[in-house]
Image (cartoon, coloured by chain):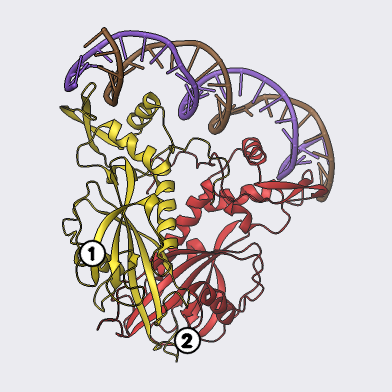
Chain colours: A red, B yellow, C purple, D brown
Amino acid sequence: MDGYDRYAFEPFAVTVDLAVFTLRAGALHVLLVERGQEPYAGRWALPGGFVRPDESAESAARRELGEETGLTDVSGLHLEQLRTYSEPDRDPRMRVVSVAFAALLPDAPEAHGGSDAAQASWTPYDGARELAFDHGRILADARDRVGAKLEYSCLATAFCPPEFTLGELRQVYETVWGTALDRPNFRRKVLATPGFVEAVPGAARLTGGRGKPASLYRAGTATALHPPLLRPTPEGRPA
Amino acid sequence: MDGYDRYAFEPFAVTVDLAVFTLRAGALHVLLVERGQEPYAGRWALPGGFVRPDESAESAARRELGEETGLTDVSGLHLEQLRTYSEPDRDPRMRVVSVAFAALLPDAPEAHGGSDAAQASWTPYDGARELAFDHGRILADARDRVGAKLEYSCLATAFCPPEFTLGELRQVYETVWGTALDRPNFRRKVLATPGFVEAVPGAARLTGGRGKPASLYRAGTATALHPPLLRPTPEGRPA
DNA sequence: GCAAAAGTGTTACAACTACACCCATGA
DNA sequence: TCATGGGTGTAGTTGTAACACTTTTGC
């Protein structure tokens, strides 16, 4: 970054792309938009758009999410940078460098199209069809990251409403990882980690319509899990 | 990223910045360059530069490292994306979005200035003075990331030459983390992790000039550590 | 009563910690 | 022979896995 040179003013565009996850009916869902314009008109894609001259990529991500999908109540939104995709040919029109984000939402307000998006909707992750650009890869990278961060961070609470039961928190892990967890052990593990959750005194709620009402908890102040909550033996796992 | 709009052609520049680490004399060192031009002329900064229209950020990072510091023999270089810094005011001249990388080198070939860099040199991490732009923050983020990745990945071998002793590998952990590790336990832990290291049959080498010659090992094929090698109780650690 | 979900208890095993101890080498 | 670093052994503790069992709700 040393001074101006002739490469500084080549037409680079900088965009953001968002992989926004939520849980619906016990399945991982992702927020997709249908493109209204070429290229890839009619194809589904991740929401996103151009970064404006006066905002950071993080600000652009929140703005575009509201503009394209109508999700303006983003109070519970957890947003974090994934990585930046910069292959020269990733957009057929011009040179576009995209800063990708992974985002988590507790409940799932209905989405609707806006600005450049013909429509927006929550789609089951496994049912996601071929996406525009390299968004399929970005989405897969985001899912891997979220799954991995559940192990050593308190990220799971970002999928839950402000008050939740331990059963709901366990379902977050089971849904994202696709494995069943031992309920008693999960409970002890979570309660033994200081700052992960804190009890809401006296409160209780039914989880599945039947069964004993469960105590309610709020997200604690901790962000990291020590020791981590490891996935049940997926053998060799990628770095 | 839906079609052209008026924000697409604002003058964005895209750069890369590299935090390159190595170990020298038992201390963590980082590769810095002295800026030859305004702004921040004469100040130290991370090596880096503009991404060209026909290359990815990863390619640009390797190219700039060679151009600015003379490090062209990058066979043992481990390079990975850190994150992207995009605050609007991070460069006083214009809008510059920078993709930052963390890099690790086993040995430390001498560096010399080149292209935009007046000079380049390996600097002890703790002795790093105030850096240009937001490079101080990037450097701190990179160091945090490297320290964290040592816990759950085989990254430590990237600091070691092709053949190394377990004592050298342990010094990587001790130097980056700033804590002493129990030698026998470290040895067992590393050898018990399949694919972390593989023995070089028959080979041995003296580590510190004195003592019993140590067996030599090569980096294995694994990339992740399961279970992880956790730091000794730093209490609350950031996410 | 029965099914479902919360919550508690217990035992066996795996991993980690903290040492003590021996070995090989250079000064 | 002493200091230094490599390598092995082992007891105590902690954490996890895999259950059985009780409690409280809706139907």
Residue B5, x across and y down, in percent: 44, 90
Which of B204 and B113 lies nearest the eye of the viewer? Answer: B113
Q: Indicate whether B231 appears above or below B79.
A: above
Mark 1 — on which chain does it sit? B
The residue furthest bottom is B6
Three-letter code, disc 2 = Gly
Q: In the image, which disc is placed on residue B119?
A: 1
The reply to the same-chain question for discs 2 and 1 is: no
In-image side of A177 versus B180 (left or right): right
Q: Residue at x 50, y 52 (%)?
A: A149
How packed is label 2: few (under 14 Cα within 10 Å), some, or many (20 or more)? many
Three-letter code, disc 1 = Gln
Residue B196, x across and y down, in percent: 31, 37
Residue A209 visible in this rendered orientation of the protein: yes
Q: In the image, which disc is placed on residue B150?
A: none
How packed is label 1: few (under 14 Cα within 10 Å), some, or many (20 or more)? some
Q: Indicate whether A73 appears above or below A126.
A: below
The nearer-to-camera label among 2 and 1 is: 1
Which of B142 and B125 lies nearest the eye of the viewer? Answer: B125
Mark 2 lies on a secondary structure that is loop
Residue A183, x across and y down, in percent: 64, 39
Q: Indicate whether B167 appears above or below A191.
A: above
In-image side of A204 versus B35 (left or right): right
Mark 1 lies on a secondary structure that is strand
Q: Residue at x 72, y 49 (%)?
A: A165
Residue bearing the label numbered 2: A36
Residue B157, x across and y down, in percent: 29, 42
Q: Indicate whether A59 appears above or below D6.
A: below
